[in-house]
Amino acid sequence: MASIAASYLIPRTRRGLTWGRNSSVVIATAGGSRSSLRSVDLVNGKKVNGVHIPGEKKGSLFMEEPHVEGNKPLHDCLLGRFVEQNFVYGQTFIIRSYEIGPDKTATMETLMNLLQETALNHVTCSGLAGNDFGATREMSLRKLIWVVTRVHVQVQRYSCWGDVVEIDTWVDAAGKNGMRRDWIIRDYHTREIITRATSTWVIMNRETRRLSKIPDQVREELTPFYLNRIAIPTDKNDSDKIDKLTDETADRIRSGLAPRWNDMDANQHVNNVKYIGWILESVPINVLEDYDLTSMTLEYRRECRQSNLLESLTNTTTAAAAAAASAAIEEPPKNNLQYTHLLRMQPNKAEIVRARTQWNSKPKRY
């Protein structure tokens, strides 16, 4: 934790920060020792009551707004914690400048990365983590890993740069050989639910890359953490099958998409979040500019490696076609647009991900 608490010397006018009176800085030496610390009154216009450093006299960093759970230090919340008798794991995140898009709000990829981070930390903090990425100990002994087969995300509102969000996640059984993981994202201060997500996971052998049944030993590890709760009501969940797109049915095709080395994850395949950016490559630019992506469903068909060359296909549904037609005759477009997508291998047309998206027009900003 020393590296987190030990900030660098920053002059009062540098890096866009505004420091109040009695401003001070923590200095960390190579040996880990620290200089004296004075209280800080204002940082970026926010009132704070000092900084707590492990090993020093206890203080705490409080933002002006009281936390609903009772003035809990924000840096403590960022570490994550179990609630509801250890069935639910929660973690708090600050939206960084590099996690926002052109409209200065978090992107769908940002949200998916935060969901994935919370899930991995849930496994680690539960004491189940084995040697592999997100796997339990019994899974690691059998060379098994988790792979996601379906994800559905509903976004009510995207957070802005600097906003603080709180994510809760939990798991439950999904049939005989699957696991369901759900998430809820709240605004940290207002407690408003701004995003809901659900996903289905199965087990794959790390070496043979074949799907596997859940061994009894793994099931025994997981069952104590199962919570019979859903983030998205059944009648609002997108559980319909996604139609396959072809060259004949697609409106737009973007070819020549190539995974990079840093698109790979610790399980030696392309990280599932990376697919979102490639899927959106074939969405019309005016939709990206004028609409918010409010719902996304992903069906993962096969894994992808760095050596694969990809194509992104998009097809306009009836609602989107009607909106495009009304725009052509200068009528106000409909609020909702819907698209079907396919990400596939370029040489042999093998499917990687099918997707369905829904878009709502962005509110006008004056």
Image (spheres, grey):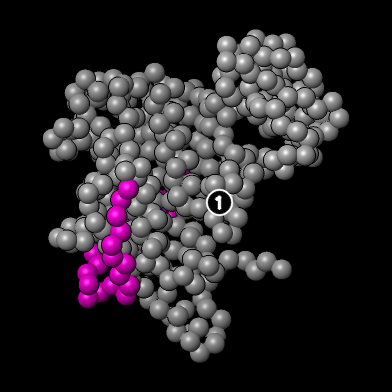
Residue 262: image x %, image y %? 36, 42
Say above or below: 67 vs 318: above
User: Would residue 240 be visible to someone looking at this image?
Assistant: no
Residue identified by numbered label 1: 100
Quadrant of the image for the N terminus? top right
Q: Which of the 4 image quarters holds residue 256?
A: bottom left
Q: Residues within 10 Å of mark 1 (few under 14, many from 20)?
A: many
Highlighted range, magenta = 231-260
Does the stretch in magenta take in 266? no
Residue in the picture at 58% in, 43% down: 96
The three-letter code of the residue at mark 1 reads: Ile
Q: Which of the 4 image quarters holds residue 40?
A: top right
Q: Which of the 4 image quarters holds residue 119?
A: top left
- Tell whether 45 sits left or right of 240: right
User: Would residue 345 be visible to someone looking at this image?
Assistant: yes
Say above or below: 146 vs 295: above
Can you name the residue that lies furthest to the bottom here? Answer: 329
**Closer to the camera in the image, 318 or 27:** 27
Residue in the picture at 55% in, 51% down: 100
Can you name the residue that lies furthest to the right here? Answer: 21
Quadrant of the image for the C terminus? bottom right
Residue 216: image x %, image y %? 20, 23
